[in-house]
Amino acid sequence: MLEEVAADSALVGEEVAPFEPPDPTRAAPEWLTTEDVAKSLQLTAATIRGYIRAGELKASGTPYRIHRDDLRVWKENRATAPRSSAKPPKRSSRRKPDSTFTDLARKSK
């Protein structure tokens, strides 16, 4: 198969470079996507975008890109920040029951 590709490329006048696996000693990219950050922190990309919109995590561009140093600082700040023992307020999606319905429910008991 490789010989066929090499032969076809030779016909066009191009040289075929041998495959080289990535060098593990090379530095990782400096800019990360929200998906990259989410995967490394075991969170969702939506959660990471929420931190960015809230101003907690610095990012640039659209779509967002997070610099590796900004991520490191953010993680350090979160690790040393005191945790609040107060629970966040619950958001209720339920409506209060209608008084006539409540009255009917009580009467049926």
Image: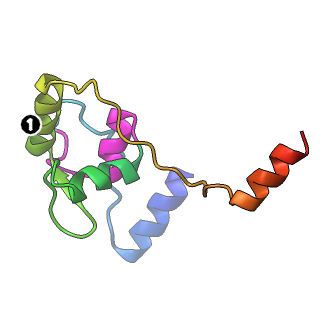
Say which residue appears at 24% left-offset and 62% top-offset: 64
The verdict on residue 29 being magenta is yes
Tell which of 86 and 16 is nearer to you: 86
Say which residue appears at 29% left-offset and 39% top-offset: 22
Viewed as shown, does residue 5 lie left or right of 67?
Answer: right
Tell which of 32 and 55 is nearer to you: 55
Viewed as shown, does residue 33 lie left or right of 28?
Answer: right
Viewed as shown, does residue 81 lie left or right of 39?
Answer: left
The verdict on residue 58 being magenta is no
Residue projecting furthest to the right: 108
When the figure is inspected, residue 35 is found, relative to residue 73, above or below; the finding is below
Residue linked to disc 1: 73
Binning the other alpha carbons within 10 Å of mark 1 as few (below 14), some (14 to 19) or many (20 upward) gives few
Say which residue appears at 12% left-offset and 29% top-offset: 76
Residue 21, image quadrant: top left
Q: Position of residue 99 (x, y in %)?
A: 69, 58
Q: Which residues are magenta?
A: 28-43
Secondary structure under badge 1? helix
Residue 100, image quadrant: bottom right
Q: Position of residue 69 (x, y in %)?
A: 8, 41
Residue projecting furthest to the bottom: 12
Q: Mark 1: which amino acid?
A: Val
Report the quarter where the C terminus lies.
top right
Q: Position of residue 47 (x, y in %)?
A: 36, 48
When the figure is inspected, residue 17 is found, relative to residue 106, above or below; the finding is below
Say which residue appears at 57% left-offset and 52% top-offset: 1
When the figure is inspected, residue 82 is found, relative to residue 8, above or below; the finding is above
Q: Position of residue 59 (x, y in %)?
A: 16, 57
